[in-house]
Image (spheres, rainbow, N blue to C red):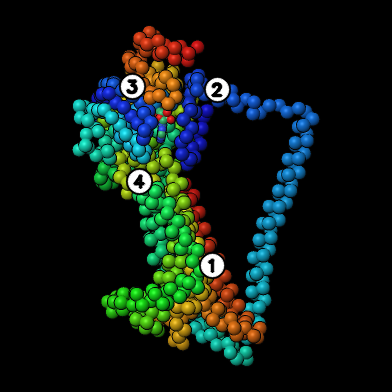
Amino acid sequence: MAKRLDLKDVDIYYGKFHAVAGVTLSVPPRSITAFIGPSGCGKSTVLRTLNRMHEVIPGATVDGQVLLDGEDIYATSVDPVSVRRTIGMVFQRPNPFPTMSIRDNVVAGLKLMGVSDKKKLDELAERSLRGANLWNEVKDRLDKPGGGISGGQQQRLCIARAIAVQPDVLLMDEPCSALDPISTLAIEDLMSELKKEYTIVIVTHNMQQAARVSDQTGFFNLRATGEPGKLVEIDDTEKMFSKPSEKATEDYISGRFG
Amino acid sequence: MNDPAVSGTSTGTGLTSAGRGLPDEPNVPEAGAKVPESPQPPAGNTTGTATFTQRGDKIFKAMAVGSGGFIVFLIGAIGLFLLIQALPPLLSNQVNFLTSREFQVSDPADLRFGILDLLLVTIEVSLFALVLAMPTALGIALFLTQYAPPRFARPLAYIVDLLAAVPSIVYGLWGLLVLAPAIAPLAVWLQSNLGFIFVFAEGTAKAEFGSTLFTAGIVLAVMILPIITAITREVFSQTPRTLIEGALALGATRLEVIRYAVFPFGKSGYISASMLGLGRALGETIALTIIVAAVAANFAGSLFSGGASFASKIALAANEFSNPTLTGAYIAAGLMLFVLTFAVNALARTIIARSGAQA
Ligand SMILES: Nc1ncnc2c1ncn2[C@@H]1O[C@H](COP(=O)(O)OP(=O)(O)O)[C@@H](O)[C@H]1O
Ligand SMILES: [Mg+2]
């Protein structure tokens, strides 16, 4: 539970296209790390290399090391499927299995891991739904389809699904971008709760969100389209938003805050 | 941009964010670019456009209502035609139309025709074809969409589609001349080893000669395979990327991705494709006419039987349609096929409505 992540000199490609170059950073356990930067600079791409989701795109490859508590998840002996079982992911658009019941959605990952005891699954489903602040809203309709609740609830259902397997790390790619402000608040509160138990990496387009929820912030940028995106700097969130070391960071952040 | 209604479409809207924050810089030019798209048109133009739109709407509505009504009228007219033709012989029928296995119409004064045998043969041979075709089509569709690299998938899909272009007369000849001798050993083996199951029991035709419903069912399966495969493949390939990635991110293997994301998404499409295939099998005529031996004995349920389905019975009698009473008897049988196909369609709709209601 709650492991640390270290990236060492990571280069990421889509076929021949060099999307991200030379990323080195550390994510300490039980903290929230936010990735910010303009669109297309490779934030999602970096995030998806952290649980080996990048390589499901044909031709996509990764160079360098990604260490989970010191173990390289890209070592040849490591099965990507097992990596994805220990590093959870929440996507930009809520994607529960629409016809599957709410309960089955939550325990889908557990079932994939071979847990079949019904009592245990029910217990874990309740715990995860409580953990995702969704229990009270859905406890009376656990057997209703997961596609039948609101977008904000669906996203929290996806978070419940991701934390049900008690992952070492939780990755979130703009988890609030398809949601209304109230659902966004609910999920931000939830992240601060989850931080106590999980290592969280979040991509966000929303600077204020990064400032509010994260402990450290990484700023990605790219010089021109066609060039690889780069990690400009990563530091404590407070420092990044008050006096960043790089001029580019300051420009970007001040541009946002007007 | 708030979008709480999450549809099944794949992502692609990488830029919609800014839950509570300021709009993103990359969004600004887009938002700006949208402004000129809705300029206030000059006042004179506005009324002109509105009138035109209203007239267009009216024309379109008339066309839509008209063609919809025409279809209903056409189906009603066909039904009525069949009914009018079928009624006189039905009234002078000496046996029960629904429960009799006889079909004696040579003497107009003593009509004895019932459709039970035709119904049973039609249903059994079609279901047998469906049982063979459904899993095969599912396997091919999954292989083409989930496993085969696009380079192979496209030509392979094309070949399967080509199966639909083969005329049924060719299927009939192929079934009788090529397939029947080839599967004779299998047929004999099934009969001697699984003969205790009624479908493989000794029937009214010899298993080794191949002019059986068994052969016909296999040919029908090949004939309906392309339509089931094509639709199922299309539906599976539409599975939203977000669903597939959701399953993958939970640590699903390829097979589990199919079980969790692809199949549930495409299930109702697969069922309706199969029902379309079944509809085609129920009405198939020429292949059955060529392959299946005509026999006098009643159908007892074995696939190793001769006999006739609704369609092949009518086709075989087509050159005798000289007097209206006799013709009417066959039309009555055709009417039953109509009803049967209708029932299958209704059934398919219920199944789809039930599984689709949750989606
Ligand atoms: N599936 C893909 N195939 C090819 N190129 C991609 C793919 N996804 C993203 N890219 C490219 O990689 C770069 C980084 O994209 P992405 O990580 O999505 O950026 P961000 O999340 O920061 O907006 C962009 O230039 C984008 O066009
Ligand atoms: Mg992104």
Going by the numbered disc 3, the residue's amino acid type is Thr
Count the numbered circles shown.
4
Identify which amino acid the numbered label 4 is placed on. Val
Return the residue at label 3.
A33
Instruction: Please identify, in this view, whether the residue under mark 1 or under mark 2 is nearer the observer.
Output: 2
Badge 4, how many Cα within 10 Å: few under 14, some, many 20+? many
Please give the residue where the numbered disc 4 appears in the rendered image: B257
**Of pointers 4 and 1, the one earlier in the residue sequence:** 4
- The residue that label 1 is drawn on is B341
Q: Quadrant of residue A85?
A: top left
* Label 2 environment density (alpha carbons within 10 Å; few <14, some 14–19, many ≥20): few
Judge: label 3 CB < 8 Å from ligand 1: no
- Say what secondary structure mark 1 lies in: helix
Q: Name which residue lies at 29% across and 21% down.
A: A24
Q: Chain of mark 1?
A: B
| Residue that lies at the very extreme toward the top in this rendered image | A243
* For residue B358, side relative to residue A109 (left or right): right
Query: Can you see residue A127?
Result: no
* Depth order, front residue of B335/B286: B286
Helix, strand or loop status at disc 4 = helix
Foreground of the two, A80 or B165: B165
Few, some or many C-alpha atoms within 10 Å of disc 1 (few <14, some 14-19, many ≥20)? many
Q: How far, Cα to Cα, is label 3 from label 2?
A: 29 Å
> Do labels 3 and 1 touch, CB within 8 Å?
no
| Residues at marks 4 and 3 on the same chain | no
